[in-house]
Image: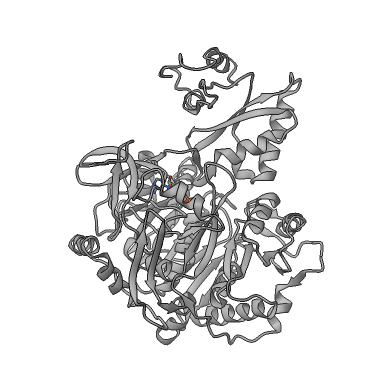
Amino acid sequence: MIDFAYRTSNDYLEAKEKATDNPEAFWNEVAITFDWHKPWVKVLEYDFHKPSVKWFLGGKLNITENCLDRHLKTQPNQTAIIFEPNDLSEAAQRISYKELHSRVCQAANMLKANGAKKGDRICIYMPMVPELAIAVLACARIGAIHSVVFAGFSASALATRINDADCKMLLTADGGYRGNKVTPLKAIADEALTQCASITHCIVLKRTGQNIAWNTIDLWWHEEIEKVTNNCPAEIMDSEDPLFILYTSGSTGTPKGMVHSCGGYMVYTAFSFQNVFQYQKGDVYWCTADIGWITGHSYIIYGPLAVGATTLMFEGVPSYPDYDRFWEVCAKHKVNQFYTAPTAIRALQKHPSELVSKHDLSSLKVLGSVGEPINEEAWHWYDEHVGKKKCPIVDTWWQTETGGILITSLAGVTPQKPTYATLPMPGVQVVLLDNEGNEIEAEAEGILAIKHPWPSIARTIWGNHERYKNVYFSAYPGYYFPGDGALRDAQGNYRITGRVDDVVIVSGHNLGTAPIENALNEHESVVESAVVGFPHDVKGNALYAFVITNDIIDDEEALVDALRAIVAKTIGPIAKPDCIQVVSGLPKTRSGKIMRRILRKIAADQLDNMGDISTLLNPEIVEEIIKNKP
Ligand code: PRX
């Protein structure tokens, strides 16, 4: 097991100083602890204006050799993955490093036998079963670029992502279990594939055994895997070769396929995993995210496996069969580090605390939070009921784009502060900017920006480098602009205040409002729509849609149902607005821009502080919308 964790606050401060003064020497030292086929000739080359970032130039490696092969020498029988199925009646599985290595190599050969090769894009649309992690690693083994699409996304969202990356192969399952629901993944995939010409092979894992349609490109996973051996030497990759594409919503247009590279991503996810969670050999670590999101990529698969950890994968949901499932799993597998999202904490907090106290949670050492700001009440509930006030809580701020955690406390090493993500990781140079782009010092509130690259920054948007430049590097030239606002206290702790663009974080899911508006506008009765976020006590934020229709609507309820269904079909059920209001107009500036600021206030019922509306083209509409609010 690799151990480059800082154990004291002083270690952290020293590392931070070193990483700021000489980032290249600092990251050089971290990177040499991994297995490389060929060392790099240069640690870093970057220009945020172009933008271009390259780490460990000329270095050759395969991330799976670091996640699997090298542990075979030291801990072949250590459990790599614990799998906890959706249903209590199904036994949990423990997969050792040796077994995982063998299964990944065999799956890699299965992909190769079906024509996959280095550089090909392979889409993975699978439930949270071990084969999903195996599929991801099998792609990495052969140098194919994986694009995992969350299994809750609709056929149309899946098709958009397959087509954007021009994927050659799809890995899916007949269905997936989630709580008391069975998702017909293969049927959804079939519908998506009617719009995707690039897919030549669809490999189907049998999970639920449900009836499915069978097409000429379909192959059963269990039949294909039988045809190949488990001997698969790793493809040697350049440090800067793409490892994967993962889509995230933007405030406009189609989802952005963030591209992560092999070398830098490996170094940073392992380094941050080890330091943030203070993982120790033999610990059981559980991140409740889905592998369909970046949290699952970095902190269920790559980071933990790179340091030789035991990582738990859970197929189900926190409410099934009852609202104590998380705590039951923690007790059952003696979980030491538990990493979840504020939205889950808020949902569970609403249930009697006996559901927590009846389980033995004494194994827990560290708690983590990710995906959205954690409010004070949820933080304290987590601390008292789950952590029994003895587990440090790491509130980790990061993004799909950043690849790894950038602002956080290090469990038990650096101070925590409720609702604050606290301090940047060593080597992460965070600043606050004012609206003009000037750096602001000391205690302040402003726009979060980062002025030096870290190894796991996404290198581009697949097929659209211009968009990458425009979204992240143009608003404040010379900085990476994540799209969040933050405030900083006198000790330098950061508290994330939320998005400063048109992305809304709903239950920890990053949703752009523009694609939802586009979906609503597809309905024949809708002329124009505007979607905004408003505070919600469990989801953090919920969506409120204002729609203008082309005619008088007799049955508004039916329209609202139809609109919610369109959004679910086009994007996925997570994007369905909580509230849809039919309006006769939207507040607009004289240049025709929708004043979302006003709509946000209306949605949030903050009516006494509307600001100046006299400059609107149609100020009277504000009163009307408020009056008719459902
Ligand atoms: O607004 C921030 C919020 O989630 C956004 C990134 O979303 P996504 O790419 O889906 O990745 C989520 C998992 C890493 C950020 O721009 N966010 C994430 N973590 C936090 C957060 N907001 C506040 N506190 C956090 N700990």
Q: Residue at x 66, y 35 (%)?
A: 520
Residue 539 seen: no
For the C terminus, the image quarter is top right
Q: How is the image coloured?
A: one colour
Query: Which percent across, then down, holds residue 594?
Result: 53, 26
Whether 503 is drawn above or below 107: the answer is: above
Query: Which percent across, then down, holds residue 206?
Result: 71, 68
Query: Which percent across, then down, holds residue 422?
Result: 29, 49
Pick out the residue farthest to the front: 50
Q: Nearer the viewer, residue 346 or 269?
A: 269
Q: Residue at x 46, y 16 (%)?
A: 615
Query: Which percent across, then down, holds residue 162?
Result: 65, 58
Left or right of residue 188: residue 590: left
Q: Nearer the viewer, residue 453 or 14?
A: 453
Left or right of residue 434: residue 152: right
Q: Quadrant of residue 71?
A: bottom left
Residue 361 seen: yes
Whether 132 is drawn above or below 421: the answer is: below
For the N terminus, the image quarter is bottom left
Q: Nearer the viewer, residue 245 or 559?
A: 245
Left or right of residue 538: residue 49: left
Q: Quadrant of residue 519?
A: top right
Q: Nearer the viewer, residue 527 or 575?
A: 527
Left or right of residue 182: residue 243: left
Q: Residue at x 44, y 45 (%)?
A: 353
